């Protein structure tokens, strides 16, 4: 009789330790979840900033390419102006009608080429004018997002340090609750804690497992009342206890 009472007392103490251990582990897990959010949120915000940077760079690249193309057009126009001037001189110095006519025709061809290039230049300038305000807006958006990102990173680093200190402080309490729990019971609890996201030890409620709401067998209910050993749910495997 005394042995049974001692065993009941021991098992009851183990269950209470597991409940206390679960409370500590859940506090640690809650802080850890907050810690885990920070790098994910940083990555998300970084991706938003990078997207704006890519968009800004596309506008800048388009303008740079257009300006480079415009400079090429200007060189071509200068070359055509020089060629027209040569042909005009050749025409004015011609000694016969055929030479004059040939030079005049060549001048007309060169002027047509020049006109086409100048039309292309006009289209190009209109494109640059349309892109310039878009680039200015993109620069403003990048500057605002960069400032927002830098402020978040600064605050996130402080918060991370505070949370790590808090987590470690709570985790330091764990040893006192885990001390004395049989290794097999501790291993069972640890596996269930991971499996059921912090819900390894649950009360029975009106003859049902409060974790999965499966009805307990008469034998399990009797064992819970007798507190003769660890009782686990036949369905989900959670460790059960009687709160009454």
Image (cartoon, rainbow, N blue to C red):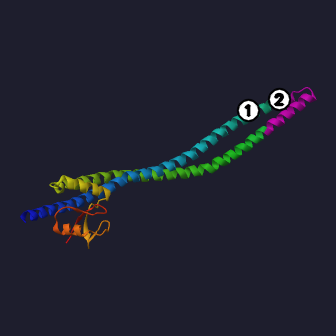
Instruction: Name the residue beneath numbered marker 1.
Output: 79
Q: Is residue 215 above or below residue 191?
A: below
Give the Cα separation between the discs numbered 1 and 2.
Answer: 15 Å
Q: Is residue 201 above or below residue 43?
A: below
Comparing 111 with 47, the one in front is 47
Q: Is residue 108 left or right of residue 121?
A: right
Comparing 112 with 199, the one in front is 199
Element under label 1? Answer: helix
> Dot 2 surroundings within 10 Å: few (below 14), some, or many (20 or more)?
few
Q: Residue at x 68, y 45 (%)?
A: 124
| Span shown in magenta | 91-112
Instruction: Name the residue beneath numbered marker 2.
Output: 89
Q: Is residue 52 left or right of residue 3?
A: right
Q: Which quadrant holds residue 171? A: bottom left
Percent position of residue 9, x then y: 12, 64
Q: Is residue 103 left or right of residue 172?
A: right
Percent position of residue 225, x then y: 18, 69
Q: Residue at x 67, y 36 (%)?
A: 72
Q: Residue furthest left?
A: 2
Element under label 2? Answer: helix
- Asked if residue 222 shows in the view, the reply is yes
Q: Is residue 107 above or below residue 8?
A: above
Percent position of residue 206, x then y: 26, 73
> Dot 1 surroundings within 10 Å: few (below 14), some, or many (20 or more)?
some
Q: Which quadrant holds residue 244? A: bottom left
**Magenta segment, prevailing SS (helix, strand or loop):** helix
Query: Mark 1 or 2, which is nearer the eye?
Result: 1
Q: Is residue 117 left or right of residue 177?
A: right
Q: Residue at x 36, y 51 (%)?
A: 154
Percent position of residue 18, x then y: 20, 60
């Amino acid at each position: 009789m005394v042995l049974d009472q001692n065993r009941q007392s021991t098992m009851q103490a183990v269950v209470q330790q597991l409940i206390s251990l679960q409370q500590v582990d859940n506090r640690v897990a809650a802080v850890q979840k907050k810690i885990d959010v920070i790098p994910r949120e940083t990555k998300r915000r970084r991706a938003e900033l990078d997207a704006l940077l890519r968009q800004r760079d596309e506008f800048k690249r388009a303008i740079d390419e257009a300006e480079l193309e415009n400079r090429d057009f200007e060189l071509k126009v200068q070359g055509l102006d020089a060629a027209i001037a040569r042909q005009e001189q050749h025409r004015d110095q011609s000694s016969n009608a055929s030479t004059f006519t040939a030079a005049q025709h060549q001048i007309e061809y060169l002027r047509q080429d020049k006109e086409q290039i100048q039309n292309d230049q006009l289209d190009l300038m209109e494109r640059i004018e349309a892109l310039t305000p878009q680039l200015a807006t993109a620069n403003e958006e990048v500057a605002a997002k960069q400032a927002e990102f830098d402020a978040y990173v600064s605050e996130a680093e402080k918060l991370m340090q505070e949370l790590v200190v808090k987590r470690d402080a709570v985790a330091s309490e764990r040893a006192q609750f885990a001390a004395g729990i049989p290794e097999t019971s501790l291993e069972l609890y640890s596996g269930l804690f991971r499996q059921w996201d912090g819900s390894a030890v649950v009360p029975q409620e009106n003859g049902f497992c409060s974790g999965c709401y499966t009805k307990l067998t008469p034998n399990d209910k009797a064992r819970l009342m007798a507190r003769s050993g660890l009782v686990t749910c036949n369905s989900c495997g959670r460790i059960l206890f009687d709160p009454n």
